[in-house]
Structures are given as structure tokens and as C-alpha cells.
Amino acid sequence: MSKNILIVDDEDGIRYSLRGILEDEGFEVSEAESGEKALEHLSDEQPDLVFLDIWLPGMDGLEVLDHIKKEWDWLPVVMISGHGNIETAVSAIKKGAFDFIEKPLSLEKVVITAEKAVEFSRLQSENKALRTRIAAEQPARLTGQSESIDSMREVIGQVAPTDAWVLITGENGTGKEIVARSIHSQSQRADKPLVAVNCAAIPEELIESELFGHEKGAFTGAEKAQEGKFELADNGTLFLDEIGDMSLKTQAKILRILQEQRFERVGGRKTINVDVRVIAATNKDLFQEIKNGNFREDLYYRLKVFPLEVPPLRDRSKDIPLLIDEFITILNRQHGFKQLTFTEPALKVLTEYSWPGNVRELKNFVERMLIMFGGKEVGPDKLPPEIANGPRIEKTDVDQEQLPLPLPEGEVDFKKARADFEAQFLEAKLREYKGNVSKLAEAVGLERSSLYRKLKAYEIQVD
């Protein structure tokens, strides 16, 4: 993180001395000789800390402090004065000053105070980033006991501790944001911000400002400088949700910044360096978007260091009762609903429903039921018609009870019997996964290349 300090003092010698001390410690320093000049500077660019003299010509330091706390309440201010007394110090602290230092200035005191104040500024910045983080009530873990979720947990456990970028794909409402939070919470950046950007929700004309920040006057309505999401995510994780909805113009800028990890704010000239891990997500088929000319191929391969596909809820229906219990617990804690239970016949209907809206639809359904039937037991007769009579999960063509093969009688060659079983097993499972070789490979624990070789050897047709 940057360590920028603004020194406000009408004495050239004091500004010179402070600049020398602080620059030797690695800080970047700006100066203002009056309160009015200081406020002009702050309107254009906010530092991480202000050293502010109390006795200034024109607007005095306490007045300047009032203005700073009104406009930039998160910004730490250290008051300095050669005429300090207890009353002045108390007044400054009450007005929101971070600390108070008397002249002549102690080099050690200045450096220690600056380090503490900049750390405080960093924490304040991260607190601001909390507002943009994915909703706190969502668990940073995957709920379920299905094979697909167990497999995804294992994969997340492998990629999370690395700094590899991740591209999460899946239908709307499958929980891509929860996967992103799970990766971040298990990473080495877990104590830093996770900043989320919904690329589909930001107007095209504002997305650059949202991502990169802007300087005062950069465009109509830019009344003061503002940090962008990349700055807020420095040393942490940036979650770019619905990445497929970005315009080609923004994609080009994103690609350059992702490669260089540095950028300028909109309307600015100063280069800002960041260290950001990127997790991107989309519900679109990016290969098709590339063919249609809507997505850059180079950006796709830059983001797709480690791909993850989140399965739809209909492919893990055994997790539905667990998710229902979790949502009831969360919503009861948040809103004080009365406890809700579903009968076994009702749960059967719910687990057979195809949930086209996936986990998001399930959560909305649970909240609706809590509002209507909190404190009661819900049977099939109380379920909404669109769910009770809605689309059901398709049964697979393969009856799992038919596997394994019936044992042949008489003398049998063991290798041939094993090969026959493996061939029928793979053919049956391929039909179950509707020809999706990737899903089959994941389910049976084989590398996709090895699986292709086996399918070819057994002359199993792949669509």
C-alpha cells in the first residue's frame, strides 16, 4: 500500500525537516503552506496521513481539522504545534485528530506516529472495502455432501493457497460468489480485502471509474477524487463477477492492467501499483462469446489460469435438504423468523424439483416459506404451485441397481471380464452425464486424456 503524507505548516524549515525525516523512512511527501492550500490539495488527492500545524495564517489548524473530518472522516490527522498545551491537545483529539505532537519535533516520535497513523489509514481503507465485499451472511464454504461438491472442495483446497487466478463458470444462481469467497478465505490473502465488482450492474460509462478510480473533475459529477476497486483490493482479492458482460473497450484496459498490475485513475497521471489476485466468474459460454466477437481471446486465456465449473443444483439434489436447513438457520438469525420444518413428502417434492434458478432460487423460496409459515410444519399442500407442479429432475437412462454386471458362469478370463465391466460402466456413466466427458472424468477420478483413450479403446462413441 502507498504511504503518502501531506505536511501542512507555514514554516518552510518545519516542512523541510519533516520531509527529510519521512522520505528517509520511505514515505511520499506533499506540502501545503496554509489551511486553504491543504484543502485544495485534499480535494484533488487524498494522502494516507496529514501532519497539520495548529497555528496557521488565515484558517487555523483546528478549522482545517473540522473540514477534513467532515469531508474525509477516515483520514488520520496528526496535529503539531510549538505552543501546545493540554487544552489544545484535548480539543484536537475531541475533533477527531489521531495524535498531537509538540515542537521541537522528536525524530523518533514523528516516525513512530507516522507508522501508526498510516497503518490506521490502511485499516480504515479496508473497512471501506467491506461495503463492497460479497454479502457477509453468505457462508464462505460450500454446503453439501454430493460427489461434485466434495470434489470442488478438494480442488479449492489445492488452488486457494496459491496466487493462481481462477475463472469460475456456471449457471446463474449456482453459488459462484460463494466459491470465490471460499477460495479467498483459504488463501494467504484471507486477512486482506475481498472486493467484488458486478460487471453487469455497472453502466459502461462508469465502469472504468469504478474499477480504476477517478480524480476530481475527471467527468461531470466527479466532485472529489475516489479510489477504484483495484486500489481497494490491493494485497487482497478482486472478484470480477459476470466478466462476460464487459465491453470490448473495457476488456482491453482490464487486460493491460491485469498484465502490468499498474494503472492511472480516470483523469489522472500518477501511476498506481497494486498487488491483486483476480477471481473472475461468468454464466456465459466465453468460447461462444469469443466466436461472436464479444469477448477477447487473450483476456480469456489470461483469466483462465485455473478453471472451475460450479454444478447446477439439479445435478446435486441430495444437497437440497442440507441447503434448506442452512438457509433457515441464517434467515432466522438475521430476521428473527420462527422455526420452520418440512415434512418428508414435502422434502421429496423439493428434491425432485429441477430448480432452474439454482441455489439462489432455493434461498428465496425458503425465505418466502419462513414469512408465510414460520413456526409451522410445511407439507406438499403448502408448497407453491410453480414448485409443486414445476419441472422435475430428469431421471437418468441408467438404473444404477443394474451395475455391476451379473457374474458369468463357468470359466472366465479375468482380464476380459474386468475390461467388459469397465466398458459397460463407462458407457453407462457417459449416458448418465449426457456425453459430458469432463464431468465423467471428474466423477470417476480419471484425467480427461486417459478417459478419452479408454473410450476410444472400448469403441464408445463420444458425441
Image: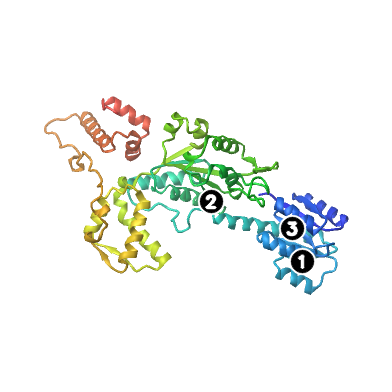
Question: Which residue is at a point 45% across and 49% down the rendered structure image?
Answer: 177
Residue 149 shows in the view = yes
Tag shown at residue 62: 1
Q: Is residue 206 left or right of residue 102?
A: left
Label 3 and label 2: CA atoms lie apart by 27 Å
Give the image location of residue 171, x and y in percent.
38, 43
Of tags 3 and 2, which is closer to the observer?
A: 3
Label 3 and label 1: CA atoms lie apart by 13 Å
Amino acid beneath label 3 = Val
Q: Which residue is mark 3?
A: 50
Q: Of helix, strand and loop, which one carries label 3?
A: strand
Question: Which residue is at a point 74% across and 49% down the rendered structure image?
Answer: 26
Amino acid beneath label 2 = Leu
- Above or below, comparing residue 449 to residue 110 in the picture: above
Q: Which residue is mark 2?
A: 194
Earlier residue among tags 3 and 2: 3
Label 2 and label 1: CA atoms lie apart by 36 Å
- Above or below, comparing residue 140 to residue 212 in the picture: below
Q: Are marks 2 and 1 in contact (CB under 8 Å)?
A: no
Q: Nearer the viewer, residue 109 or 352?
A: 352
Residue 276 shows in the view = no
